[in-house]
Amino acid sequence: MMQQNIRNIGIFAHVDAGKTTLSEQLLAHAGAIRQRGSVDQGTAHTDNLPIEQRRGISVKATCVRMMWRDTAIHLIDTPGHVDFSAEVERSLWALDAAVLVICGVEGVQPQTEALFHALREQKIPTVLFFNKLDREGADAEAALDGARRLLSADIAPLWDEEALLEALCNLDDDLMERYLSGQEPAKEERTNKLLTLSRRGEIYPALKGSALRDEGVEAVLDAMVDCLPPPAGDLSAALCGVVFAAQQDRMLGRGVWVRLYSGKLENRAALNLPAGMDPLTGEEKLVQRKITQIRNVAGQDAGALQAGEIGIVYGLGDVAIGHVLGDGTLLPRRVEPGRLRTPLMTVQAIPESPEKMNDLRAALMTLTGEDPLLKATYTRSLNQLQLHVMGAIQLEILEEELKTRFGLGVRFSKPAVIYRETIARATEGFVAYTMPKPCWAIMRFRMEPAPRGSGVTFASEVPVRELSLHYQHQVEQALPLALNQGRLGWQVTDVKITLTEGNSHQWHTHPLDFIVATPMGIQDGLQRAGNVLLEPILSIRFLLPAECVGWVMSDVALMRGEVTATITQGDRVILTALVPVESSMDYAATLAAATGGRGGMSVALHGYRECPLELGATAARRSVDPLDTSKYILAARSALEGGIFDLE
């Protein structure tokens, strides 16, 4: 069953490309608002947080509804600044199509490129809009050429019939053959072919105009309806939806934004949601939550949410962002936080007075519920509260949000790099958890280095007759706990772990013994293998005046980086380089000051590489060391405050 009269569309752009101004014009033309708002004046309808209105930037993704040609368009306006890439990424979970705004003066900027490749990777059909063509220096054709070079050759400018036909012919051999033989296809055929290919995400229709001057806006609305696909969703199929955002309501409590891909949700329906681990059985506990209200995108009580729709659902408690409701196999794409960009820095959050620590913890846990990548963690032994963050702008917004929303003053320590670690050589880890009774879990692991970026893989060679499948699953379940901190204090990655021996006891084995014992065996292996510190490496794309290229290349070398490519575009140069995070954290400000604002840079995580310990850092252990066997077992049996299952 296809929802032909709905479009779920995200609007994306590099910061300052005019995305929010375009959103205002779209809403006005569709009759969803009476008066256009202004970003500069803080009156934009999609920037509804006080922080956004004061600062004139989008911080949270906002979903608004408008009608155009009898079609309901759910428009998700996303932040442009890279510090809020997590918001952008979560928006991708909810939409079926996209509009990518490109500045007609600057052309394809670094974040534009990152956004387009994320959309293409997810196979999301996309329309391009070249904006700000009223500005001095704007050049639609130059911007189009840059987009074809940096984004995709399959961009079809709707303002140029000849170029549009060429783009279509490049994707259709029959059309190409007829065109070369002088049989130009009729306009209706060309239009039908364009709509088919664009709805499949095989060609990218392009429009041009000026959102500020209200030029080309209705053409964007038409393209949303014609060139972008409706949601595919079967109302009669099994339930499948994803939680992609959260918000607080003074009367109804926590509400979560849900995109439903199949099935139906109704008021008072009961859902079984995860609620942690059962300490008696080691199995995941479920708690039943009953939906108390469902609102549509316009904020009205809808009573139900159907396949293809987006809405706000109340009554699901603290269900996690990214949780899949129902059958996850029906999702059209993976839901995996951190694919677009992941935090690479950590800071300590310090309350304005020590007695406010608990209040600050509670506030940051609430914010972590809205943005899981913040990962607020509290270490009791050190009385420290740490956050994972993207950058300085995010910290400024967090400080202001804690003050205005929660009434809490906070300061942050200087950002530090989040390293990772791996093993130096193949080894074995062993544990015999047999004392003090009752307990019995014996395991041996083979641990081998794996290629960079491969993460952690697990396999078992133990026959089920020697160790039941239930216990083997528990071992795999406990690996994130076991690898959360290695011997250097960082998350362990790029390792292949194989369970080679396993033994339980008919009478003495407790249901949680293999979960308790796994970290002891893994840490034993990590200690034997030797530790390798891994530092994050950024791929930085600089946009520079030609006269600045030389000293930027020198700076890259001083930052322990390497230049990988340079491309000259008139009087500007695009320079790409690989640079460690540790040495480049403050370089954006340095670059802006040195170039008088004419130079810019954007970053993406390239990967991790080995780093000498003297150039990196270790991290303090946040919980009891599994190799401190006596204390660890006591903690595991809840004899010490905190326990091993508390990863804060």
Image (cartoon, rainbow, N blue to C red):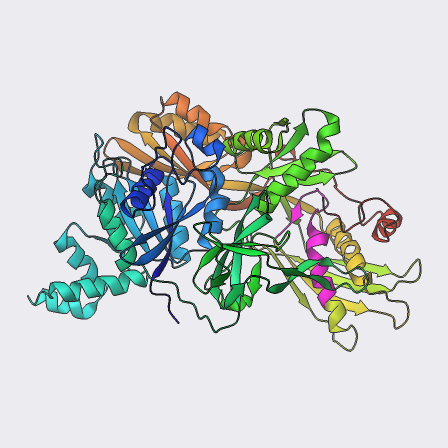
Q: Residue at x 73, y 72 (%)?
A: 469
- Check the image and name the residue furthest to the left: 182
Question: Where 31 sits versus 271, above or below?
Answer: above
- Check the image and name the residue furthest to the right: 437
Q: Is residue 590 magenta?
A: no
Q: Position of residue 441 (x, y in %)?
A: 83, 64
Nearest the viewer among 452 and 458 is 458
Question: Where 488 sits versus 153, above or below?
Answer: above
Q: Position of residue 337 (x, y in %)?
A: 54, 51
Question: Where 224 sits versus 510, above or below?
Answer: above
Where's the N terminus, which quadrant? bottom left
Q: Is residue 486 magenta?
A: yes
Nearest the viewer among 185 and 462 is 185
Where's the C terminus, which quadrant? top right
Q: Quadrant of residue 130?
A: top left
In the picture, measured across the screen, residue 87 lies left or right of residue 217, that is right
Q: Quadrant of residue 380?
A: top right
Q: Residue at x 19, y 52 (%)?
A: 158
Question: Where 57 sits versus 484, above or below?
Answer: above
In the picture, measured across the screen, residue 42 lies left or right of residue 181, that is right
Residue 44: tell me if it is visible: yes
Q: Position of residue 76 (x, y in %)?
A: 41, 48
Nearest the viewer among 648 and 68 is 68
Q: Quadrant of residue 73?
A: bottom left
Which region is colored magenta?
A: 473-493
In the picture, measured across the screen, residue 208 lies left or right of residue 19, that is left
